[in-house]
Amino acid sequence: MTMKLNPTLKLIMQVLVPVAIGIGVVVFMMGKEFSLSQFERIPLTWHTLLAIFLACICMVGREWGMMWRFRVLTDRFLSWKSAFKVTMMCEFTSAVTPTSAGGSALSMIFLNREGLSLGRATSLTMVTLMLDQLFMTLMCPLVFLCIPYASLLGFSDTSLSSGLTLFFWIVYAGIVAVTVLLYLGALVMPHKIAVGINRLFSVLILRRWKSKADETGKNMIATGEDLRTRRLRWWAEAFGATAFTWISRFLVVNALFIGFSPYASQLIVFGRQFVVWTILTVSPTPGGSGVSEWLFSNYYGDLINDASMVLVIAVLWRIITYYVYLLIGVFMVPHWLRTGGKRH
């Protein structure tokens, strides 16, 4: 006999697990590298407070960029309010699921609840994923062209450098491969994906949903045909919103470094954010908990040479880019479940 958790308790558990992992790693690092007396060294001035505020503005810019992209992709069918709800739900699911699983991939469900057909919502989710992967694919050569390779993947700690370098390039190769596959699926051969869905739901255990799967496949083919007729301006605006979203996310750390380590190279700080987020795309923990804190502290340490200050920036970074969404989700999800996520 299995025991089922009610939705509220399940939600609480999904929030507490990643929080516990992240706090555990931070406490462990604090125990090794941080003493209470070092709190006195943290400069809480107007300059640092302004930097934290700027970091928050950058994160707001990221959310606005995601809302803008949803509006573009749906031809302004989504209102700003609906786009905000979809964006926040995507951020929350990304925070409580392993980044390797891709919480944002659930946007098809949220878009469907806001009035789009499931087939169209599925196709647009594929497009958003493709645009994200395309941005990362194109960003890599630009970053390494502008920043010395040794500043991004070369360290005095050779074991960290070699391991991080190998892992980064493996992940990047995977991103390029996924970009190509999504392009083929969304634009070149959506009909083959529809056939695959049809065959999948022909299996006895899934047959009860076959009619809906067939409808989804037909909608995907129709959406694919629609996407192929889109003008370059439409694609440029969608990609522009994607680039704005990612760059705003990267700039959060730049803003924090301005306040707490103003002499560090802003270009290198920005480039390393690209490397960090590339690696975090395959994190096995919810929202990259634990992995993010450890990676940040080790990766940025040579730019500050002060373990306590690195940890302060890492904690602020995670609060702004991660823990805030857990808090937002706690308030939004129960309401979303009660209302069925429907527009009103």
Image (tube, rainbow, N blue to C red):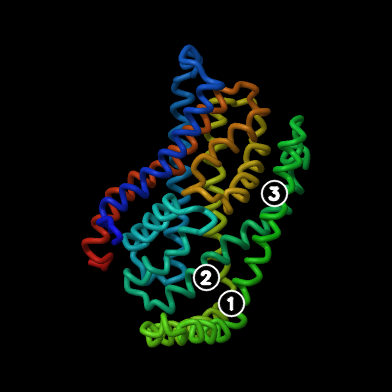
Query: Which residue lies under the disc numbered 1?
Result: 185
Query: Which residue lies under the disc numbered 3?
Result: 167
Tell me which amino acid carries mark 2: Met
Is residue 168 shown above or below 255?
Answer: below
Whichever of callouts 1 and 3 sits on the residue coming sooner in the sequence is 3
Tell me which amino acid carries mark 3: Phe
Q: Position of residue 295 (x, y in %)?
A: 60, 38
Residue positioned 23% across, 57% down in the render: 335
Residue 313 has which mark?
Answer: none
Disc 2 secondary structure class = helix
Residue positioned 51% across, 22% down in the render: 31
Mark 1 and mark 2 in contact? Answer it, CB < 8 Å.
yes
Q: Quick one: quadrant of the C terminus? A: bottom left
Q: CA distance from mark 1 to mark 3?
A: 27 Å
Q: CA distance from mark 1 to mark 2?
A: 8 Å
Determine which quarter of the picture holds residue 182: bottom right
Is residue 53 shown above or below 309?
Answer: below
Whichever of callouts 1 and 2 sits on the residue coming sooner in the sequence is 2
Q: CA distance from mark 2 to mark 3?
A: 25 Å
Q: Position of residue 84 (x, y in %)?
A: 36, 57
